[in-house]
Amino acid sequence: MQRPSNLSALVFLLATLFALLYAPDTHAQNGPSILLSPDPSVSPALAQRVSGLCRQVAPVLLPGAPPRQGDLAVTSQVSVGADGMSVLHLKFYDAVSAALLFGHDVPLFRGEVHVALDSFLVGRIRQALGMLGAPVPPPAPQPPPPPTVQPYVPIQRPAPTYQAPQPEPDKQRDEPVEQEPSAAVEPRSPEPATPEPTTPEPAAAKRPVAIRFGVGVGSGMHAVELPTELGARRVPMSSFAAFDLSLELHATPSSGFAPGVRLQYHSSLGYTLTETSKDGTKQSSPARSHEVLLDALGNIYFGEPRFDASMYYGLGYAVQNLRTDFDLELPDYTLGGPHLLLGLRIPFASGHVLLTLSPDLCVLVQVSPALVRRATESIGYAIGAEAELAVHVSGAFALRVQYRETRASMASTYRGSFSDTKRFITTGVAAVY
């Protein structure tokens, strides 16, 4: 008659174990819990990564579970800075009062948190739980957990003094006191602070436009050849001091594309133009040779803007000009027209060094009448190229070296063709906001 009762007890025991082990709990039975609130800007893989780091410290509440006293709420959001780097914004709140404890920004590499920051973030989560005054469970993978203490306790129990009834209880009462400091060595909020109730701060919004301003000084070179009925008038390649200014505006990248606009200006300083006629005579005059480029850009990104290569194309207008203080055989002139360009950006050293290469083409439809009167065609072309190497010393400043060359050409009714060659080599700085 006892067999059925034993079988019933066994079934009841198995059912109880199954309920304890596999029944879904909406809240941790002991200790604090963590409630996660990721922003839609956080990818599912990154949200799972943050959840895994939180689970190393305390249980994570299921969605919809009500928080209780001592629980921690963690919000996460991703934004892109002016330098193109993605940043994960983490904020820690009291889950009951919604009081902000502190926040922390984590740079992302290719959209993920670097593994070297895992232990640091786990420490920050433990610090936030400690600020709530709740006991923080020790992390599982810590080196000093009690495995070395457990084998040590049974060694003293079989000691010869075990037969003595009076000293043994004293030792048993002392043993837990000795074990508590070893287990309490964990970094569990040595100085708990009571946070003042504050309204949760909104997450940092993405900056809609990035502005880049550059300035540089260096040297330039200029050469001109103008066919005439008496022969070619030539200005041999001569050098001078030069400077350049640039201003770029780029929208925040969206789906791998961002529009923008760029203005560039190159000019000579202290230029003295000397022309040589066919009979060898020379005439000189102070002059200025400069160039202005204004383009609307389309930026195409193949990954993270700061770490991966990208390309851009532009359409705008270009103007180059030569002015002299004294009248020479070579007249003052202006050349301009629609401007097309195609560029490539190649980052190195984790985005700290950026190489930019850009060829361009200009159709010269704006030609000064002074050149047309000298039997020069009213339309021509100009080809150019630009290369820049920028070294980022911080998130907002960079050192840069730039080279630009432009060759303009137009046909002439005389023998030969009109040509204008400009070269600028400058070194300077660039600031990004």
Image (tube, rainbow, N blue to C red):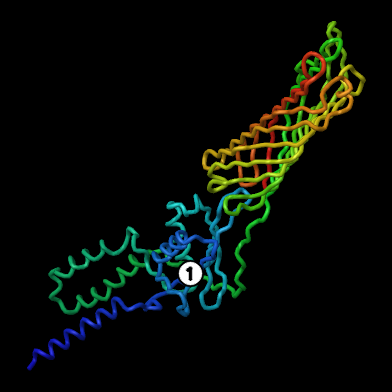
- Front residue of this view, candidates 426 and 305: 305
- Give how far across and how far down residue 156 sits, in percent: 18, 67
| Residue type of the residue flagged with mark 1 | Leu
- Give how far across and how far down residue 309 sits, in percent: 55, 41
- Residue that badge 1 annotates: 36
Q: Residue 268: name its quadrant.
A: top right
Task: Look at 56% across and 41% down and name the residue there.
Answer: 352
Task: Look at 54% across and 46% down and name the residue there.
Answer: 302
- Give how far across and how far down residue 259 sits, in percent: 67, 49
Disc 1 crowd, CA 10 A, few/some/many (<14, 14-19, 20+):
many
- Outermost residue toward the left? 1
- Front residue of this view, candidates 341 and 239: 341
Answer left or right for 392 relative to 292: left
Task: Look at 66% across and 51% down and name the residue there.
Answer: 251
Answer left or right for 195 relative to 208: left
- Front residue of this view, candidates 66 and 295: 295
- Res. 433 visible in picture: no
- Res. 382 visible in picture: yes
